Image (tube, rainbow, N blue to C red):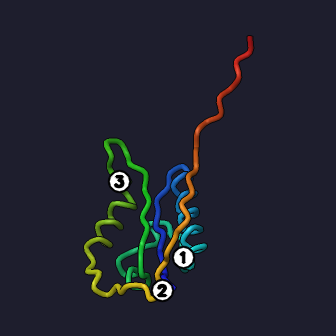
Amino acid sequence: MSKIAVVYWSGTGNTEAMANLVAEGATSAGAETEVIPCADFSADKAAEYDAFAFGCPAMGSEELEYDEFQPMWDEVKAVSYTHLTLPTKRIDEISVVAVSFKKKKRKRES
């Protein structure tokens, strides 16, 4: 079974909601998942997982959130991933769930 870390930063809760849905889809496909705020994840924890999913909304001119997510991202991507191995059980299908956060249109009164 693959162990997957779903690491996110969320300012409004939308990215956290998507992280939970990603984890739910991976779990339903047979993976063991853990949803982790980026402040609680580091390169030291990377060896505990077979795979990662990272989520962060873009800030301003398509930049990552710079106080928590960017430092964690830089640290984790600098780690050598030679310790990671291919999962022994292949996940053939992961359900993808699309969520719309559109505001409801109000009906105009005449």
- Up-down relation of residue 102 to residue 90 (above or below): above
For marks 3 and 2, give the CA distance.
33 Å
Distance of label 2 from label 1 (alpha carbons)? 15 Å
Q: Amino acid at mark 3?
A: Leu
Query: Which residue bears the numbered disc 2?
Result: 89
User: Foreground: 89 or 31?
Assistant: 89
Numbered label attached to residue 4: none
Residue drawn at 41 percent across, 76 percent down: 51
Q: Earlier in the sequence, mark 1 or mark 3?
A: 1
SS category of the residue bearing label 1 = strand
User: Residue 30: where, in percent of width, then height?
Assistant: 57, 79
Nearer to me, 39 or 28: 28
Three-letter amino acid code of the residue under disc 2:
Lys
Of the residues under marks 3 and 2, which one precedes in the sequence?
3
In front: label 3 or label 2: 2
Mark number, residue 64: 3
Report crowding for label 2: few under 14, some 14 to 19, many 20 or more residues within 10 A (C-alpha). Answer: few
Q: Amino acid at mark 1?
A: Thr
Q: Which residue is mark 1?
A: 33
Find the distance from the CA under tag 1 to the CA under tag 3. 24 Å
Secondary structure of residue under mark 3: loop
Residue count near mark 1 (Cα–Cα under 10 Å), binned few <14, some 14–19, many ≥20: many
